[in-house]
Amino acid sequence: MEPSIASAIFDELPDDGKPVTSVSKETRAKINEAILKLESVNPTEDPTSSPLLNGVWSLRYSGGYDDDWAVNSPTRPIALFVYGWIQSRTFRA
């Protein structure tokens, strides 16, 4: 793994132990660029089905959504939280 690229992703997120539910457009762009760089240097063939993925994971960031196009809904934050919670449980060993 490229520690400097991975660090660039985590450096953009608050370190309060809570999942990040919203970031600025600039932060989202920085994280997306770092993820693309990290994916390009990943030595693991077919990483989504690799045994290296097994374990207990804590969701820190789930990609975020741009509020400019998202449907304005009072239940949207709850839905995104539940989706993140489900995703974090999906990767348990």
Image (spheres, rainbow, N blue to C red):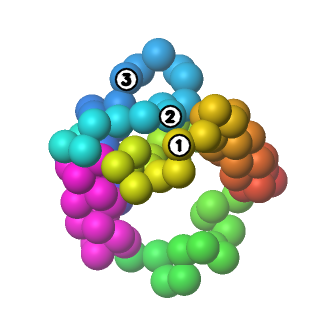
Front residue of 89 and 63: 63
Left/right placement of residue 75 relative to residue 26 reads: right
Q: Nearer the viewer, mark 2 or mark 1?
A: 1
Q: Say if the magenta span includes residue 16.
A: no
Q: Main secondary structure of the magenta part?
A: helix
Q: Amino acid at mark 1?
A: Asn
The residue carrying mark 2 is 21
Quarter of the image with the N terminus is: bottom left
Q: Amino acid at mark 2?
A: Thr
Q: Which residues are magenta?
A: 28-42
Q: Residues within 10 Å of mark 1 (few under 14, many from 20)?
A: few
Which residue occupies 77% across, 55% down? 90
Left/right placement of residue 4 relative to residue 73 reads: left
Write down the quadrant of residue 8 in the picture: top left
The residue carrying mark 1 is 72
Q: Amino acid at mark 3?
A: Pro
Instruction: Compare marks 2 and 1 and give the one earlier in the sequence.
Output: 2
Task: Count the numbered circles shown.
Answer: 3
Task: From the top left corner, tell me how far across and down residue 82 is, in percent.
Answer: 74, 40
Task: From the top left corner, tell me how far across and down residue 73 is, in percent.
Answer: 60, 40
The residue carrying mark 3 is 14
